[in-house]
Amino acid sequence: MLRTTWNAVVKAYNTEAKKYNFTMVMGFALLSIDPKKGTPSTSLGPKMGMEPTSLSRTLKNLEERDLIERHPNPDDGRGVIIKLTAEGMESRDIAKQVVLQFNKNIEQEFGMEKLKVFFEVNQGIQNMISERKIFKK
């Protein structure tokens, strides 16, 4: 059920993102970058739950579209800070509105009480997995 629902959510987001010549992952990346300070590239992957290769491809695509810029990390000479350009900020705002509309429609359909239970169950599953209790005998 989780997989089927997640695949449907991805398809819905990608269908909407396509209207803006984007993908869901690109929008998620823009939303994951701090709009004021930028975000270290090394923290984006874990924050988004993405493998480095996929993240690199996404960042390269966003950079080619002039939505992000890479800057040296002043705290770590080897690292890079990813910052949004002016156009990146506009695209981030669009992505944010899409997510807010999605969330609003879900809340209107199911109500906050059901959503609270849904979030509690999801958090519980994540905790069981992180604590290695999911396949415990």
Image: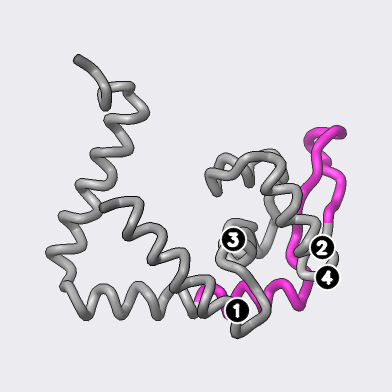
Q: Earlier in the sequence, mark 2 or mark 3?
A: 3
Q: Are marks 4 and 2 in contact (CB under 8 Å)?
A: yes
Q: Earlier in the sequence, mark 1 or mark 4?
A: 1
Relative image position of residue 26 (x, y in whole percent): 64, 64
Q: Which residue is mark 4?
A: 66
Res 123 → quadrant: top left
Kind of element beneath mark 3:
helix
Query: Which label was assigned to residue 63?
Result: 2
Q: Which residues are magenta?
A: 70-96
Q: Is 82 rendered above or below residue 26?
A: above
Foreground tag (3 vs 4): 3
Q: Give the residue type that dot 4 points to.
A: Asp
Q: Are marks 3 and 1 in contact (CB under 8 Å)?
A: no
Mark 3 Cα-neighbour bin, 10 Å: few <14, some 14–19, many ≥20: some
Q: Estimate the spatial distance between the alpha carbons at disc 2 and disc 3, rounded to whole Å.
A: 14 Å
- Outermost residue on the top side: it is 137
Mark 4 Cα-neighbour bin, 10 Å: few <14, some 14–19, many ≥20: some
Q: Give the residue type that dot 1 points to.
A: Lys
Kind of element beneath mark 2:
helix
Residue 7 in magenta?
no
Q: Earlier in the sequence, mark 3 or mark 4?
A: 3
Res 72 → quadrant: top right
Q: Estimate the spatial distance between the alpha carbons at disc 1 and disc 4, rounded to whole Å.
A: 18 Å
Query: Which label was assigned to residue 18?
Result: 1
Q: Earlier in the sequence, mark 1 or mark 2?
A: 1
Q: Is 56 rendered above or below residue 128?
A: below
Residue at the (27%, 47%) spot, across then down: 122
Q: Give the residue type that dot 2 points to.
A: Glu
Residue at the (62%, 72%) spot, across then down: 92
Q: Which residue is mark 3?
A: 25
Relative image position of residue 131 (x, y in whole percent): 32, 23
